[in-house]
């Protein structure tokens, strides 16, 4: 009887851990500061979960799968940042990192998770 109860507790703990990992990966476990200039938010493999345009600005910006602001091009570009304020839910896997290049006048935050 005690063994069965112990096995139930172990299984429940395993499910809680799996659910927590999935939730963090989908919704992000980290949020960047508000970026108004180009910057590296995260380096390494992970997931870009959402993008918040706090101030719309005059031009679109971009988010890249890169660990630095050097050598950014179409091959590293994940998405364009819209010129309207609001939150965009995404789920982009990154291998190098997350680099945000706000457009002129934009203010941006992102949520992400590391692997």
Image (tube, rainbow, N blue to C red):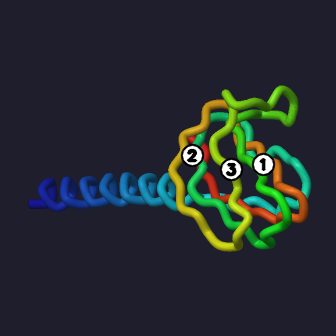
| In front of the other: 8 or 81 | 81
Crowding at label 3, few (<14), some or many (≥20) Cα neighbours within 10 Å?
Answer: some
Q: Residue at left 82%, top 54%? A: 102
Q: Is residue 115 left or right of residue 35?
A: left
Relative to 106, is 75 on the left or the right? left
- The x, y position of residue 73, in whole percent, is 76, 30
44 to the left or right of 89: right
The mark lying in front, picked from 3 and 2, is: 3
- Number of residues whose C-alpha sits closer than 10 Å to that of mark 2, classed few (under 14), some (14–19) or many (20 or more): many
- The residue pinned by badge 1 equals 100
Relative horizontal placement of residue 104, taking residue 61 as reference (left or right): right
Please give the residue where the numbered disc 2 appears in the rendered image: 47
Q: For the residue labelled by badge 3, is the local secondary structure a helix, a strand or a loop?
A: strand
Which secondary structure, mark 2?
Answer: strand
Residue that protrudes farthest toward the left in the picture: 1
Mark 3, residue position: 80
Q: Say which mark, if any, is on residue 111.
A: none
- Quarter of the N terminus within the rendering: bottom left
In the displayed structure, would residue 16 be above or below residue 93?
below
Is tag 3's residue or tag 2's residue first in the polypeptide sequence?
2
* Residue under the image location 62 percent in, 31 percent down: 95
Q: How many marks?
A: 3
- CA gap between label 3 and label 2 equals 16 Å
């Amino acid at each position: 009887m005690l063994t069965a109860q112990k096995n139930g507790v172990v299984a429940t703990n395993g499910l809680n851990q799996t659910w927590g990992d999935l939730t963090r990966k989908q919704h992000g476990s980290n949020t960047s500061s508000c970026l108004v200039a180009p910057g590296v938010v995260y380096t390494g493999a992970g997931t870009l979960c959402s993008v918040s345009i706090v101030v719309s600005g005059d031009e679109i910006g971009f988010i890249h799968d890169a660990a630095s602001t050097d050598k950014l091009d179409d091959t590293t570009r994940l998405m364009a940042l819209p010129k309207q304020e609001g939150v965009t839910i995404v789920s982009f896997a990154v291998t190098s990192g997350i680099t945000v290049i706000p457009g002129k006048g934009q203010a941006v935050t992102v949520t992400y998770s590391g692997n």
